[in-house]
Amino acid sequence: MKLSIGAMVEPGSTRTNKTGSWRTFKPIIDVEACIGCGTCSMFCPEGTIYKVADKYTIDYDYCKGCGICAHECPVKAIEMVMEEE
Amino acid sequence: MQEELFAPGHRGCAGCGAAIAARLILKGSGKDVIIVSPTGCLEVISSPYPESAWKVPWIHSLFENAAAVASGVEVALKSLGRKDEAKVIVIGGDGATIDIGIGALSGMLERGHDITYICYDNEAYMNTGIQRSSSTPYGASTTTSPAGKVSFGENRPKKNLPAIAAAHGIPYVATASIAYPKDVIKKVKKAISIEGPKYLQIHAPCCTGWGFDGSKTIEIGRLAVETALFPIYESTEGKVTSVKKVKRKPVEEYLKAQRRFSHLFKIEGGEEELKKIQDIADSNAKQFGLDQ
Ligand code: SF4
Ligand code: SF4
């Protein structure tokens, strides 16, 4: 990456760092059970849960597997499962 | 879909409360802002050279002078006649705000700059190895206030910066917690809409420094509010205008969930210290009328 004078860098360029590799447990949303409240998306420290047509979906490129989404979902629609190789 | 102004890929720990605070602040402020951040966790995790998590103009100051740098930015916007284009916001940790930068902050508040100063309060110096700050609460064990045979941890009460800020007679002071995201967003919106200096302190639990599982960041934040150890309120020109009432829980529920307080449940005399912490909560509840 080239830096300009004053060391200005590309906005949002941490995106090049895929933190999904940090994950031990993976959150899986049960779309049938999801009521679309958005709680998970609001609390995710990575901002990596997006609304897609009334339901929510996780971008696993960045999810670190913290489990906040599963812990806070009011209808327990998210399950944390062990990552496989 | 609302655009994420704080991009993923940042280096915050899994379950980072400061990252949640940054996301919520930007949801409240929108993109027409200039953010100043002093040294601290948020600065470290969001700007690993040569990357940036920020999708808004952002400048890193020294540890002690974020409020002074922000004052310069605000005055520059004024003299260029471009004040309508962006709101100036500082986002700093408790170390930079409540310890190191308090002089510059007081100057900023006293000179009347149109700036919203936001402290995300994780109650110690976290990225450097969990050293106590003046915002560390009574009884917490940190690497520089370690609990052991001769000490039960931090022996001074948490410094009350919202009260110090309010004593400047500024138009808006508020506290909030990331556990109540709509309240954070609402207060950020309100703060930036008011002309003059504003101070906001947002409680942001730190799983690494406080010692709890990263999935519980929000739960712990909620317990701090529900036990009245972190009272949520707004004040205008030094007068409290609104408080978040709670159905109060005993402080043990909050304390026992964190490693930094675990010694209080084991050491001799721990019970007495627990009682002192309950007294702090009771006095907060009384002062702000927090009980439902
Ligand atoms: S918190 Fe649960 S119910 Fe709400 S949007 Fe997320 S998965 Fe769906
Ligand atoms: S596990 Fe954590 S990082 Fe992953 S989507 Fe849920 S809240 Fe976000």
Image: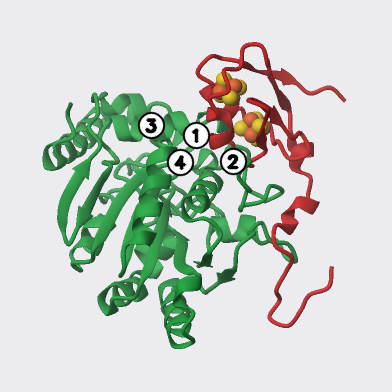
Give, as a three-letter code, the residue at label 4: Pro
Answer with left or right where residue B34 lies relative to residue B192.
right
Question: Does mark 2's beta carbon lie closer than 8 Å to ligand 2?
Answer: yes
- Figure check: B118 above or below A29: below
- Figure check: B197 above or below A27: below
Image position, residue A29 (x, y; %):
68, 20
Give, as a three-letter code, the residue at label 2: Pro
How many angstroms separate mark 2 from mark 1 (CA)? 10 Å
What chain is colored green?
B
Residue that numbered label 3 is attached to: B222
State the SS at label 1: helix
> Within 10 angstroms of label 4, few (less than 14), some, or many (20 or more) residues?
many
Chain ID, mark 3: B
Contact? badges 4 and 1 (CB < 8 Å): yes
- Indicate which disc, 3 or 4, sits on the residue closer to the N terminus: 4
Give, as a three-letter code, the residue at label 3: Arg
Give, as a three-letter code, the residue at label 1: Thr
Closer to us: B185 or B247: B185
Residue that numbered label 4 is attached to: B205
Q: Colour of chain A?
A: red
Residue that numbered label 1 is attached to: B217
